Amino acid sequence: MLVQADVAKGAEPEVDVDVVTLSHDQVVHARDRATGLRAIVAIHDTTLGPALGGTRFYPYIDERRALQDVLRLSQGMTHKAALAGLPLGGGKAVILGDPAQLKTRDLLRAYGHLVESLGGRYITAADVGTTSADMDVVGETTRHVVARTPRAGGSGDSAPLTAYGTFYAMRAAAQHVWGTPTLAGRTIGVEGLGKVGYELVALLLADGAAVVASDISTAATTRADHWTDLRIVDDVTRENIEVYAPCAMGGTVTAPLVDSLSAAIICGAANNQMAHPNVEESIRRRGITWVPDYVANAGGLIQVAGERERLDRDTVTRQVGRIGDTVQELLAGAQRDGICAGAAADAMVAGRLVAARRAQRA
Ligand code: NAI
């Protein structure tokens, strides 16, 4: 039996209301005693369309942290979808607990019932702690799921198109900074040789860039052994590089890093790259061009949006390539107005939401 407490609709909240920012359309808490499911779905904004965002399955230390995470992530999805020009809103879900211990077929099916109960206002996908195979199971009890395996009619791994979008974002930043989009002869530092980083290195080498890369996993560096012209280092940020591409964990861009970084551009796929919002101002002062992560890494979202509309791969790939146009527009606007790229992105999102609301009223 699924028990839901719908915070935005005024039911008794399970956590302090002060952490529920009133900017969200709806926040649903749910529990299924039979399977041990405890989940929160946050629908941030549905102005542009149904809220799409992945399900993070994570052992949060308490419910308050889980709520903060899902509120922040769902808001980020509104930004990501709006900047990618998609007819989608922002949402996200978290399942509380250790997936290694708690994830069962029955729990995923119960979670699917929860998603289905929202009537399509929220569409789920895979995220940290969940896989495409899990989404196949979730899809047994809801129609509102994407990022399933190709066998189940889904579009599969989103890393290749995420890397492709990041590559076009980087080319647009190069055009902005150096007046030409090619990365040939440029030295790029790729941090993280995981699913996305690996694909990005392939694209950069094919474009003629000199690439240095780092990864804490020897399995990841070994997989890249076949590229004889790729140089593996301990820390790319200490190298003499022209572009820093964070493709591992978030929070790596700190004020001390900005002070010592040789790169003129920061553009990578890692989510939430800024260690602190103030860091962006240091970046601007040092004259470094930062491409906001939620613009550069939107390829995966564009892919699952295309899956939902049953678009073919070529059409989706073309859409992902247009991330470069958005980056050019964004960087030019930021330069013109003397503001940070993040502030320019915020303004662009606000403009798109206001225009959509106006059109809906008319
Ligand atoms: P992944 O887990 O496949 O790869 C991450 C890699 O980073 C791993 O090989 C890991 O060993 C390495 N790593 C961890 N800490 C490191 C450190 N301090 N220095 C160097 N390497 C380190 O993850 P994936 O899918 O490649 O994602 C990379 C980033 O891109 C993540 O931040 C993710 O949230 C973001 N992203 C991924 C998308 C996707 O479709 N896979 C979509 C949008 C964003």
Image (cartoon, rainbow, N blue to C red):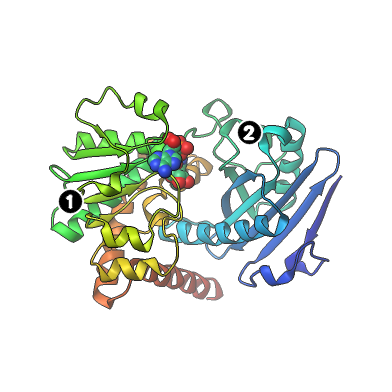
Left/right placement of residue 175 relative to residue 93 reads left
* Secondary element at tag 1: loop
Res. 112 mark? none
The residue beneath circle 1 is: 181
Residue type for callout 2: Asp
| Residue at horizontal 29 percent and vertical 24 percent from the top | 225
Q: Residue 300: in sight, yes or no?
A: no
In this rendering, is residue 2 above or below 332? above
| Label 2 SS | helix
Classify residue 98 by image quadrant: top right
* Point 24% across, 75% down: residue: 336
Q: Which residue is mark 2?
A: 134
Q: Residue at x 71, y 37 (%)?
A: 108
Q: Residues within 10 Å of mark 2 (few under 14, many from 20)?
A: many
Q: Would you say 310 lies left or right of 60 here?
A: left
Residue visible at 56% across and 50% down in the picture = 53
Which one is earlier in the sequence, the residue at label 2 or at label 1? 2
Q: From the viewer's perspective, is residue 34 above or below residue 181?
A: above
Distance of label 2 from label 1 (alpha carbons): 39 Å
**What amino acid is labelled 1 in the image?**
Pro
